[in-house]
Every structure is written in structure tokens, then in C-alpha cells.
Image (cartoon, helix red, strand yellow):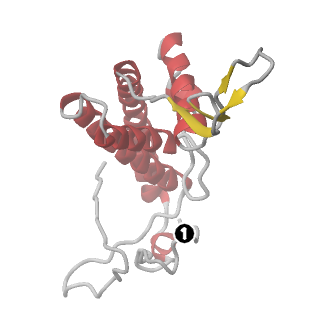
């Protein structure tokens, strides 16, 4: 199994190959697409771990930086379990099948924090009301003050949630690496059985240059 990470800049285009360099051809097979998806998931999980480590060791106090790292880690982790038009999501029931019931329960808690608090505003972690002070409300004449908008915001960031997200990320990495080994073996088997004509039919692989012109478009396989 060989993984080659190529970083590209927005707007970068593919150029000609240096003389003597061998063309690379994309393997057009279900196992290859699954292997790619799993590698993308692994990359996201590893980034999640980095951000959680920064939270644990460098941002132990409630600060804007800590909130930003927590938001980033939470959304990056669950990115792998949410629907995508270009990448098959992971099934939490399968990924966490060997985890204790408490671990699976914490997945649901953290997912609710992501869905209902961090990314969307639906639960009681954020509330608001227009409040008006009324003196002597039961008396014959009530004195009413000026109304004021009051917001109540609770942070979803605490050591317990950080620890649980880290454990879930490690468990997910273990599953993904095992699935990657299976997908890699299937790709190798397909390449051995496929004809040369099938392997080169699509021509040398060219990546799609990322830019603001295609930012709203689904990428190809």
C-alpha cells in the first residue's frame, strides 16, 4: 500500500511531465474509489487529533482560540460521518461496532452538539429573550423599565467532551486503517486481472484545478 499526498494551490494547473517521467493512470474501480475515500477520512481524523492535542496542551483556558480549535475539531470529525456528494460517509454503527456502549452514546452526544449547537442553533445551549424590568408587579401601579435583549450562551467545550472526541477519533482511525488495507488488496487484485487497455483507457490522470470558478461544483471521481 502506497499513499502519496500531493498539495495543490487554488488555481494551480497541471503541467507537462519532465522528460522520462512515467504517466500515472487512475484506477477506475469501486475498490479504488473506496480506498481514496478512506484516505480522505483518515486525513481528516489525523487533523482532528492535532487540533485536540493543541487544545489539551496549549489552550487549556476558555479563550477564543480554544473555542475555534474545538469548533474545528468537532466539525472535521463529523465531516466523515455526514452525507457528501463526492465522498461516501462512514457508518458510525460499523466504525464503532467494537466500542463500548458508553462510547457509542458519547458519539451521539457530540454529534448533537455539532448539529444543534455549533453548526446550527437549535437547542438550549443558546437562548435569548427580550426582558423588561417590572417593579411592584402585583401592586396597583407597576413601574416598567426599558426592555433589553438578553442572550444566554453555554459553551460545549469542556475536558470531558475533548477526551471523548479524542477516543472516538482514535477508534475511527483504527477502523479506517483496517478498511484501507482491505481496499488496497482489492485494488492490487483488480490491477493484476485487468487488461492494459482497460487501465489506460481514460488516459493519464489530470487533477481538477481548484478555483473560485468551480468551488460550488461537485468534483469528479
Front residue of 9/174: it is 9
Q: Is residue 97 left or right of residue 24?
A: right
In the image, residue 10 lies at what x, y percent?
Answer: 36, 75
Q: Which residue is mark 1?
A: 220
Q: Residue furthest top?
A: 101
* Residue at 26% in and 77% down: 22
Q: Is residue 202 left or right of residue 19?
A: right
Q: Quadrant of residue 124?
A: top right
Q: Secondary structure at mark 1?
A: loop
Q: Residues within 10 Å of mark 1 (few under 14, many from 20)?
A: few
In the image, residue 132 lies at what x, y percent?
Answer: 66, 32
Front residue of 154/1: it is 154
* Residue at 31% in and 70% down: 8
In the image, residue 48 lies at what x, y percent?
Answer: 35, 40
Front residue of 10/209: it is 10
* Residue at 47% in and 55% down: 32
Residue 205 vs 164, above or below: the answer is below
Q: Is residue 48 left or right of residue 154?
A: left
Residue 189 in view (yes/no): no
* Residue at 20% in and 85% down: 18
Q: Is residue 107 left or right of residue 73?
A: right
In the image, residue 158 lies at what x, y percent?
Answer: 37, 23
Q: Quadrant of residue 49?
A: top left
Residue 135 vs 207, above or below: the answer is above
Amino acid at each position: 500500500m502506497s499513499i502519496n499526498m500531493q498539495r495543490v494551490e487554488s488555481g494551480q494547473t497541471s503541467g507537462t511531465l519532465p522528460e522520462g517521467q512515467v504517466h500515472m493512470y487512475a484506477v477506475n474501480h469501486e475498490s479504488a474509489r473506496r480506498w481514496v475515500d478512506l484516505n480522505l477520512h483518515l486525513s481528516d481524523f489525523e487533523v482532528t487529533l492535532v487540533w485536540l492535542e493543541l487544545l489539551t496542551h496549549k489552550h487549556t483556558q476558555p479563550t477564543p482560540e480554544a473555542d475555534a480549535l474545538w469548533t474545528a475539531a468537532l466539525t472535521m470529525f463529523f465531516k466523515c460521518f455526514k452525507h457528501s456528494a463526492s465522498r461516501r460517509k462512514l457508518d458510525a454503527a460499523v466504525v464503532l461496532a467494537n466500542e463500548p456502549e458508553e462510547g457509542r452514546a458519547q458519539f451521539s452526544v457530540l454529534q448533537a452538539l455539532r448539529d444543534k449547537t455549533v453548526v446550527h442553533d437549535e437547542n438550549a445551549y443558546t437562548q435569548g429573550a427580550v426582558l423588561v424590568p417590572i417593579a411592584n408587579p402585583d401592586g396597583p401601579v407597576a413601574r416598567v423599565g426599558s426592555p433589553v435583549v438578553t442572550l444566554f450562551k453555554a459553551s460545549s467545550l469542556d475536558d470531558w467532551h475533548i477526551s471523548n472526541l479524542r477516543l472516538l477519533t482514535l477508534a475511527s482511525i483504527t477502523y479506517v486503517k483496517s478498511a484501507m488495507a482491505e481496499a488496497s488488496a482489492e485494488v492490487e487484485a483488480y490491477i493484476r486481472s485487468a487488461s492494459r487497455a482497460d487501465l489506460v483507457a481514460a488516459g493519464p490522470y489530470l487533477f481538477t484545478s481548484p478555483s473560485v470558478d468551480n468551488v460550488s461544483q461537485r468534483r469528479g471521481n
